[in-house]
Image (cartoon, grey):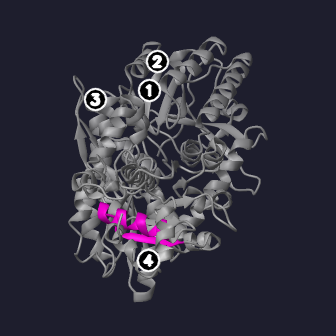
Amino acid sequence: MNEKDFGSGGAMLRGMSDSERDALMTQPTVFAPGEDKLSEQALRALSPQDMLWRHGSVSGLSEALIMMVDDEMLNIEMTQAFLVEAGYKHFVQTDRPEQAVAMMRQHMPGVLLLDLSMPRVSGLDILATLRDDSVLRHLPVIVLTSSTDPQVKLRALAMGAMDFLSKPVDPSELGLRIRNTLAASAYREYLSHHDVLTGLPNKQRYRSEVAAVLSAAKSLGSAGALLHVGVDALGRINDALGRTVGDQLLQRVAKRLASCVQTEWGGELASERHNPTLYRFDGDEFAVIVPYMDGVTSAAAFINKLLEDTTVSFQRQRSPELFVTCSIGVSVFPADGLEPDLLMRNAGLALRHAKQAGPHRYEFFSPRFNEMAQSRLDLSAELRHAIGRDEISLLYEPRVELATGRVVAAGTVLRWKHASGRIIEGDELMDLAGSSEMDVALTDWLFDQMRAHVRTWRGAGLQPVPTGIKISMANLRPSDLGHLVDAAIVAGGMDPRTLSLELQQVGAIDNLHAREAAAMATLRRKGVRLSLDRFGTTASVGHLRKLACDEVKVDASFMHDLEKDATVQAMLLGIGDLARRLRLTCVACGVDTAAQASFLKKQGWDQAQGRLLGEPLTGLNFAAKWLTRSGKPQRVEIP
């Protein structure tokens, strides 16, 4: 072996005397004599540039920083010279092991080549320090040592070393070990920052890059936005069609989002340092960083394009075509915050409000969302204890036939008298129960209360009237609802023909599994009536096509502006005509004034309920006012 064989390592030899050089040449080095040089073909086989890996995360291995700790500088320079020839470019080294850990913290290498037998601080000492360090413990370590003791090898591996090579090392084996170790580390790093399903940067990467964008925007005094994009009704698709279909849907949405975002690179939504970037945030959500915008309106076209391009249709064999949409929540910086977590939370709140308002829409964050979210969180937690504390009451209000004024049915109203004195009832309470997954327990409690009331009425010789029971389908499967109804019929002795299930949150059952659809059909065959509640807001004409029902209950919001809004009047005329053509009973809710009742009566509507026709009453008071022993209905005077 001569001086030129060491490549850059020859610099050290040139500075030595002849005696020093001869002494070193006779000592064991990192490579066995004759093995420090490989053929060009062998070097190409070890080269990181020529690796054919399936994943792009290992494409830059030649840029990885390689660190070597060895008390013999000749070993370091020989190894570096060999790796330079193999295609690696960046190195850091030390022959002072006591400085090694500090250098690692400063440079954070991609792989560490570590000698074990060193004075003052041994390689095992360094491994022990790395193991106790929260960051350095993940550093890939390849041990190089002349020790032949097998216990030393086992100790090094037990302390976290990834690989072990005995000196003298075969150069080709060292090259392969380094290449494979770097590849495994690069792929592990890739997985820690990317979503496996879509290949997009993940939530962890999103947060770190939000921080970088916010820092740049703060220094430049510019504005930007975070967009959280949520797939509407993904949970229902997973339940009805399986998670495999849901995953395929997410992949399609991801591709469309990526295409939209990439068209904005270098455009008016890009800053000097950053382009708009897409991430897989969580579950059914994606996130987009808009690093720059000149006012809110500059992002409006982009947001609308996202909504339009993420409308996905798919069709399974022998099934109808389904359309899936997305909703978007937007938080703007610096107006909505300059801290990553706060800004991300605000975008998430805006998305939830967009979804609550209906699918396929977007909402900008408002400070009132925080107040509402905190209030809702507190109420959700307390609702879980409200039933046990007897804070909830089951009330009944009369439903009146508009043509005759007869009380033909009753509607249930759940009322929660909160400890603060606040009253939460009706649709507000049902929505809260659905969002806090308390709707199942509340429905079970409602049936228990109703069975007890019916027994009391009959015990007093009174004839019950058909009763509408509000049911949230947000978390209740039709088959479970069927079990609750069966229990009411069998244990409570109730006539199924007197039960009307007023279904809310019906979007949750848009895509019913065959068994669940059969459960709904079975209820109707037993004589139970199905009612589509809150029609015109959370329930639509589309639900009438999917869900066979007997009546529609029009949302009370239509009554608010009826007397002064010609558009509302026209919509009610259309709804009434639609119900008659479909032979459905049409019930108006929230009728509070004589003018509202008069309008509906003139237009031939079937039934109505509201404060004008009778206040909600407890079971005892409702029976005393509206029930009779003969079963002949009471009447209400309608102006």
Mark found first going from the N terminus, 1 or 4: 4
Q: Mark 2, residues whose alpha carbon is within 10 Å: few (<14), some, or many (≥20)?
A: many
How far apart are labels 2 and 3 at the CA level? Answer: 20 Å
Residue lying at 48% horizontally and 25% vertically, measured from the top left: 478
Provide the residue span drawn in magenta. 74-94
Which residue type does callout 1 highlight? Leu
The residue wearing badge 3 is: 582
The answer to whether 83 is drawn above or below residue 525 in the figure is below
Residue lying at 23% horizontally and 64% vertically, measured from the top left: 262
Image marks 1 and 2: residues in contact by CB distance under 8 Å: yes
Which residue type does callout 2 highlight? Leu
The residue wearing badge 4 is: 12
Q: In the rendered view, does 433 fall on the left or right side of 315?
A: right
Q: Mark 1, residues whose alpha carbon is within 10 Å: few (<14), some, or many (≥20)?
A: many
How far apart are labels 1 and 2 at the CA level? Answer: 8 Å
The answer, for residue 595, to whether it is visible in the render is: no
Q: Secondary structure at mark 4?
A: helix
